[in-house]
Image: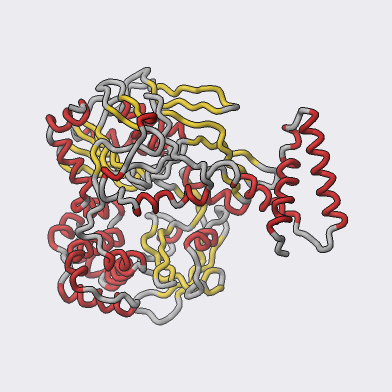
Amino acid sequence: MQLNNFKKTFFIIVIVNIIFLNLLHSQTEQLQKRKLTKAFSYIQDLYIDSVSEEEIVENAIIGMLEDLDPHSQYISKENVKMIEEPLKGNFDGIGIQFQILDDTLYVINTLKSGPAAKNGILPGDRIILLENENIAGIGLSEFDARLKFLGIAGTKLNIGIKRFGSNSLLNFTIRREKLPIKSIEASYLVNNKTGYIKLNNFSATTVNEFNKVMSNFLAHGIENLILDIRGNGGGYLKTAVDICDHFIGEEKLIVFTEGKHSLKEEKLANISGYFENGRLTILINEGSASASEIVAGAVQDWDRGVIIGRRSFGKGLVQRPLSLPDGSKLRLTIAQYYTPSGRSIQKPYNNGNEDYNHELIERYNHGELLNKDSIHFPDSLKFETLISKRTVYGGGGIMPDIFIPIDTNVYTNYYQELLDKGIINLYSLNYANKNRELFKQAYPTFDRYIAEFDISEEMFGDFLVIAKKNEISFNEKEFQRSKTKIRNRIIALIALNVFDLTEYYQIVNKEDLVFQKAIKVLSDKKLYKKVLSGK
């Protein structure tokens, strides 16, 4: 049944006090506990209608956390596994990367040697049935789809697919397995002196992945490193510290945490790292949060490397996972973290969660993504780096040493609409699927693909037909401005489908202004030193 706001608020108060019964010790607290428990028993015994205690409890916990901070979170027992698996570094599934385009679930790629690949599932396949239930054209979200694919290793999943060139439905029974999740999406040698790492999160396997990549890089004699943590939403604090330890010398402070019920705890560098002396750039943006900001903040505070991009998210709160009796969990904020110079980079949340959640939109509206001069920090948030004494700021993310705005010359409204409706992805996937055998013969290697493949005018014509069918009004002027961007993205997405993520980033980075600036800074020793000296 639906409860009105007054009743929900009352139940929230009741359940919160019951959950924390064992934490209440003072006479005043005991009195309030008895008062609320008695009121709750009246509702159970006398209320006019039946109530769902499970629903009330969940709403109560969610409501309680909403009044605390934006990052304290309740995770239902159904979602615990999905939330935690990416950080543990493995999951139970069938091994596909998918995307929902035009209300249809497409297989973008399959994990090599994973269950789906071993059973013959191919990139480009459209999954129509899951356990004999239709999932096409019903508005299925990617979140709900992932829930359907997850399960216990050893259990079976029945799927029905449509494949290009075949009118019949193909049925597969796939046994789920425990599969790895890589936190390093891509790594490659940009040139004989520079390595590139795209880090997606800070998980339990990140350090081992990083060590393997860096061992390979150093064997090739690299002197420069680009660590790309744009869009990296964070992960384990310990993992961030361990990665940072490879850049910062022994006994130097990396981060410290402190809270009302958590004593101050300092994390120091304590090993001889892989890359304590080479030239380092770290790429960040408004999607870089939490553990990403620990790394960027420490590197910046010690003048160890150049931070390039746009201001990071601004999450400086530490959460601890706490188990509840039914298998659900709380992620409760217990402390705040500070960079080595003493900066808190947590952005304000005094005006409530709604304002907090819209803060990134406000950045865009205020012009921050286009012009760093629109960003203003009060003097009270001013700090100094620990070696060069450069001015840095706290109170709302890490401000990069070199600001790179969004390239408005190519990011037109027309291009954005193509992205929003998934048209570029849809065309690229269909083209790769249709020409898969041709690609294998004509472009057996990525080097040959990147050297010889291009988007013809005929292909652009087909692409525009698909865009028109999806009700995107053609804008000649904006199309011409964005044409190169569209071309490169199609080539990159086809490479993702035919090869892998590393090849995708090799193409995307060639036109990425932030990446290109990093290359310029790393190749110019005087410029690199000038940025870090602040002179």
Q: Position of residue 93 (x, y in %)?
A: 50, 55
Q: In this view of the protein, which residue sits in the foreground, 371 or 266?
A: 371
| Left or right, 56 with reference to 398 | right
Choose top left, top right, bottom left or bottom right for residue 53: bottom right
322 up-or-down from 245: above or below: below
128 up-or-down from 503: above or below: below
Q: In this view of the protein, which residue sits in the foreground, 139 or 122?
A: 139
**Outermost residue, bottom direction?**
167
Q: Position of residue 200 (x, y in %)?
A: 37, 45
Q: In this view of the protein, which residue sits in the foreground, 6 or 114?
A: 6
| Left or right, 144 with reference to 470 | right
Residue 67 in view: yes
Q: Residue at x 27, y 55 (%)?
A: 504
Image quarter in which the N terminus is found: bottom right
Image quarter in which the C terminus is found: top left
Q: Position of residue 453 (x, y in %)?
A: 16, 64
**Outermost residue, front direction?**
379
| Left or right, 15 with reference to 273 | right
- Colour scheme of this structure image? secondary structure
Choose top left, top right, bottom left or bottom right for residue 430: bottom left
